[in-house]
Amino acid sequence: MDKQRKHLIRLGAGVAAGLGAAALAWAGTAANAATDAPESDFEAQIIGGQPAEEGQYPWLVGLGSPGEGTPWERQFCGGSVIAADVVLTAAHCVEDASAGDLVVFSGSVDLESDAVVETAVADLHVADSFNDPVAMANDWALLKLAEPVDVEPIALGTEAAAYDALETAGWGNTGSEYPVVAEWVEVPFVSDADCESAYPGEVDAASMLCAGDLANGGVDSCQGDSGGPIMTPAGGEQVLVGIVSWGYGCAEAGNPGVYAEIAGFAGAIDEVLAGWE
Ligand code: ARG
């Protein structure tokens, strides 16, 4: 599979997400930017991040399609291992999929590495409240793996807070390419009030968390990072506080990244997990 095909899959994921017109317009731009944009383009710098070290985020996984091609060629979203055989991802990544359409790549930040383990998905639960009360609200889904993976799971943040530090990671668009090695970046917390002003009527504060540099832009998750983690390192151990969900463009001043906020639906996650035991 060539790079162009990878972009088409990503566009498909964007369309499936039922994103707004502006987000779709960006999806089109992103596909072109990835092949055409010069390295010096503003967007050309996850955006504004750096390659993750092996083992930096053991729970970070890629979500892909089964079949031919390398994991990098098949990856279209991210996810986080929250129990040995459970991955938390975004609803918009998998809403039209069956378990058999999905595989999980774990074990390395490098999706072309021999260390990558490919695991089938046995069951899939998309949040019942996805897109309720607004588009992209409650953007979470759980994947039950066909067998456990040998990686450290991440703990869920169950209380919303104004986080001092947040970082996000994934194999999404850096502005110039879809990287083979996952990238990570620190993103400033954005309050619900500021996020509401940025996206009037589109923010469900109960299930969304916003982050980004409102004044300057330059740091953000982007297309292909969806489903992956936003974490707070506070207290020494990383805690999963959100899931990459949406934004208008990527890393633009005034348009923060929006994440599904775990604290808003941690109870619903527990219920699904209890049913799977
Ligand atoms: N919806 C995108 C995806 O499917 C993620 C967009 C995140 N955008 C942002 N500006 N943080 O990969």
Image: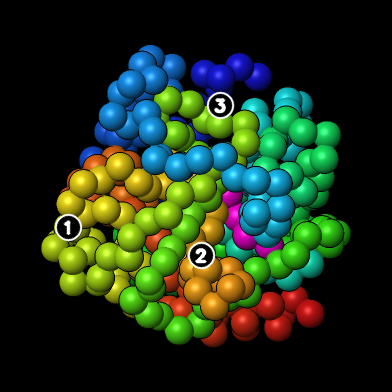
The range drawn in magenta is 77-81
User: Does the CB distance between marks 3 and 2 fall below 8 Å?
Assistant: no
Q: Distance between the residues labelled 1 and 3?
A: 31 Å
**Residue in the image at 40% along x and 40% along y:** 47
Report the amino acid beneath label 1: Ala
In the rendered image, which residue does mark 2 sit on?
231
Query: Taking 147 as reference, is 132 above or below it?
Result: below
**Residue in the image at 49% along x and 68% along y:** 232
- Image x and y of residue 213, in percent: 27, 53
Nearer the observer, 242 or 23: 242
Report the amino acid beneath label 2: Met
Crowdedness of circle 1 by 10 Å Cα count: few (<14), some, many (20+)? some
- Image x and y of residue 218, in percent: 30, 42
In the rendered image, which residue does mark 3 sit on?
6
**Residue in the image at 47% along x and 58% along y:** 167
**Badge 1 or badge 2: first in the primary sequence:** 1
Q: Residue 185 carries which label?
A: none
Q: For mark 1, give the secondary structure.
A: helix
**Badge 1 or badge 3: first in the primary sequence:** 3
Q: Nearer the viewer, mark 3 or mark 2?
A: 2
**Badge 3 or badge 2: first in the primary sequence:** 3
Can the viewer see residue 109?
yes
Q: Residue 198 carries which label?
A: 1
